[in-house]
């Protein structure tokens, strides 16, 4: 059993930086939750004060987490931004390669060991993977966000707010179609605008859209205007809004609703997405302030009109944009936490990278960049492999918010490289085949093609790349040295072996130095312009083709007839200028998760295309990409319990 760790405040630097001592670093490395519970976190007010957050800008959620008001950004608007560093990865094994751990470890290294002003920005994890296969996302070993139980479970309720908002919208859409199918225009108007009552606040956006905003009361509307106002005439075949739940539940992928006796005429097939795949989660990740959040929520496209397919119906037409904002206003505020070594952390938004944008929020990055100042660093994570999370970070997040990253880190492991080089498949819960514990330069060199493509792709965006090779106990020095040589030969500014899982920030100190050096070297070369994969003005099909060919290495894309028709409709509706958010497996550059390495000579199938107008992108579905995962035979929930004597959660990872 771990002894309670003793931490002494190491000066009055940025945050409450505290180096883990040799007495704290237990061998062999204990479980993640045992380590997390062995270190007493600082009260969150101390972290906030140390980074320059004022009392009135802090909303406490217990002793060790808080929300930070977005007014910080306005107060510090004249403060120069720090250096933004994005962390991506190699195409992973199902076990993960430690990308979140590296994000945290790098921040701990910069703050607690290299004396830099630094913020760590990561996503809030979904409870789907937490109780499914992958486990939580607080990092691991001695590079974690704490308290990890609070981080991995409810945090401050943001995902619950998203679930509530999304399902309110879905209920409102189905109910409105039901009522319109059973009532005349006159009956609808009488119920929506009772005699003697003014227009409800939520009705004004639709009135403005119809050019009726000069009308001060419902009585002023003509019969024709009343019909236009109340009859949304939604074409149910164009509706893509589904209900969500933050659980891996494959049985909800396709369901039938409205089977009660009073709703029989409205019975229809639909499905569920996981909460983090909701457009409202993507909106949270992209919004820059409360007004922007309100605008984006109101702009969610529900579908088209039956009578005029060029007329779209939005959440504001339904009168629900304001209610959604009321549910989401607290979720807009970033959550402040800390690492094991006292580095400040923003945990905010959690869109999946394979079916959404895969990045933490724009507003968390913007606030953190102001707080660290010109000489500081913000380390932000992009989900899964760099072909997914990093690509979307640049082409969607940076494009929309004007962020200018200074460096990218790509995380790799010998395990993943060997898998891509032809070693037997890796399965969660099963012992690793012997090929992964025996030295093999041959397998590494064969699998390096995958990492090489990620390096090449990322440098094309105009930033230097540093490769972080996470060391495991079975890895040999010869193998690690060879991977670093190959990475630098492929265009990486540097490649560093990291041991932060076992050693905390000290084990990522060389990575921190390499990142600082890469940023300084690039600055010495003059201002570098960010180079994105496609232009706003290009067609949606061209944008998809450019991502497929330039990032994935495909020969082209194959659009289904349904996808072609949907693209034509979206472009006709005025959404041609939106970026594309490819929904694709994280395990391969292709749409087939079994094709490893760096395949060529393939085409990317696009079976459908969906619109997230509020979030500001179109997302093509490539291959058989479910939007709600399923539970495995042996889920992680088998390990999770509560010690009823101490009240502590056990078994989280």
Image (cartoon, grey):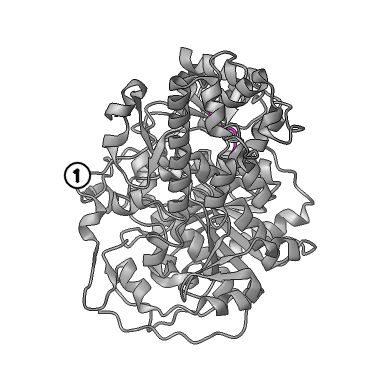
Q: Main secondary structure of the magenta part?
A: loop
Can you say which quadrant of the picture contains the C terminus?
A: bottom left
As helix, strand or loop, the secondary structure at mark 1 comes to: loop
Taking the image as shown, residue 38 lies to the left or right of residue 646, namely right
182 horizontally vs 226: left or right: left
Give residue 569's quadrant in the image.
top right
Residue 620: x and y in percent read 50, 27
Residue 643 is a magenta residue: no
Q: Is residue 613 magenta-colored?
A: yes
Q: Which residues are magenta?
A: 611-616
Q: How many discs appear? A: 1
Return the x and y of residue 265 as percentages of the image width and height: 34, 20
- In the rendered structure, the answer to whether residue 184 lies left or right of residue 428 reads right
Residue that label 1 marks: 633
Dot 1 surroundings within 10 Å: few (below 14), some, or many (20 or more)?
Answer: few
Residue in the foreground of this view, choosing between 198 and 583: 198
Please state the horizontal and vertical placement of residue 258, each as a whole percent of the image: 32, 29
């Amino acid at each position: 059993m771990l002894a309670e760790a003793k931490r002494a405040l190491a000066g009055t630097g940025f945050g409450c930086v505290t180096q883990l001592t040799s007495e704290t670093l237990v061998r062999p490395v204990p479980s993640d939750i045992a380590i997390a519970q062995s270190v007493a976190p600082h009260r969150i007010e101390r972290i906030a004060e140390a980074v320059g957050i004022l009392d009135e800008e802090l909303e406490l959620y217990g002793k060790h987490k808080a929300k930070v008001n977005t007014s910080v950004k306005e107060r510090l608007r004249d403060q120069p931004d720090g250096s933004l560093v994005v962390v991506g990865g190699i195409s992973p094994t199902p076990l993960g390669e430690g990308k979140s751990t590296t994000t945290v470890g790098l921040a701990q290294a910069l703050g607690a060991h290299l004396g830099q002003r630094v913020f760590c920005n990561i996503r809030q994890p979904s409870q789907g993977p937490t109780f499914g296969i992958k486990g939580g996302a607080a990092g691991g070993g001695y590079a974690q966000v704490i308290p990890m139980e609070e981080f991995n479970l409810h945090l401050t309720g943001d995902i619950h707010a998203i679930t509530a908002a999304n399902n309110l919208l879905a209920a409102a859409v189905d109910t409105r179609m039901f009522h319109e199918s059973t009532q005349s225009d006159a009956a609808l108007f009488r119920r929506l605008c009772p005699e003697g009552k003014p227009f409800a606040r939520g009705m004004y956006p639709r009135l403005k859209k119809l050019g009726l905003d000069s009308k001060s009361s419902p009585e002023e509307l003509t019969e024709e205007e009343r019909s236009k106002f109340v009859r949304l005439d939604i074409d149910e075949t164009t509706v893509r809004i589904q209900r969500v739940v933050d659980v891996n539940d494959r049985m909800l992928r396709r369901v039938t609703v409205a089977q009660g006796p009073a709703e029989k005429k409205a019975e229809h097939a639909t499905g569920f997405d996981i909460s983090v795949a909701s457009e409202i989660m993507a909106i949270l990740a992209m919004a820059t302030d409360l007004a922007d959040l309100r605008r984006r929520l109101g702009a969610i496209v529900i579908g088209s009109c039956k009578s005029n397919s060029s007329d779209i119906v939005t959440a504001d037409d339904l009168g629900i944009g304001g209610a959604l904002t009321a549910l989401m206003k607290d979720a807009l505020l970033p959550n402040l936490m800390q690492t094991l070594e006292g580095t400040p952390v923003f945990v905010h938004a959690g869109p999946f990278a394979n079916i959404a944008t895969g990045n933490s929020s724009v507003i968390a990055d913007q606030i953190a960049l102001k707080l660290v100042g010109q000489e500081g660093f913000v380390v932000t994570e992009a989900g899964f492999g760099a072909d997914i999370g990093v690509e979307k970070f640049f082409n969607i997040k940076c494009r929309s918010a004007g962020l200018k990253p200074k460096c990218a880190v790509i995380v790799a492991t010998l395990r993943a490289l060997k898998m891509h080089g032809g070693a037997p498949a890796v399965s969660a819960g099963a012992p690793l085949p012997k090929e992964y514990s025996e030295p093999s330069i041959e397998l590494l060199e064969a699998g390096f093609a995958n990492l090489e493509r990620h390096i090449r792709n990322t440098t094309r965006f105009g930033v230097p790349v540093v490769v972080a090779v996470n060391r495991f106990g079975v890895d040999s020095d010869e193998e690690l040295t060879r991977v670093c040589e190959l990475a630098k030969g492929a265009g990486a500014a540097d490649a560093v072996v990291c041991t932060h899982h076992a050693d905390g920030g000290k084990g990522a100190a060389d990575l921190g130095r390499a990142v600082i050096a890469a940023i300084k070297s690039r600055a010495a070369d003059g201002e570098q312009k960010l180079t994105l994969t496609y232009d706003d003005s290009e067609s949606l099909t061209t944008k998809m083709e450019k991502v497929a060919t330039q990032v994935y290495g495909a020969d082209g894309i194959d659009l289904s007839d349904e996808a072609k028709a949907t693209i034509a409709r979206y472009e006709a509706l005025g959404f041609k200028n939106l970026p594309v958010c490819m929904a694709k497996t994280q395990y391969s550059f292709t749409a087939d998760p079994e094709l490893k390495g760096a395949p060529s000579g393939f085409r990317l199938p696009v079976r459908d295309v969906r619109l997230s107008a509020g979030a500001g992108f179109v997302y093509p579905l490539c291959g058989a990409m479910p939007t709600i995962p399923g539970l495995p035979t042996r889920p992680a929930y088998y390990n999770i319990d509560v010690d009823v004597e101490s009240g502590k959660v056990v078994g989280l990872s």
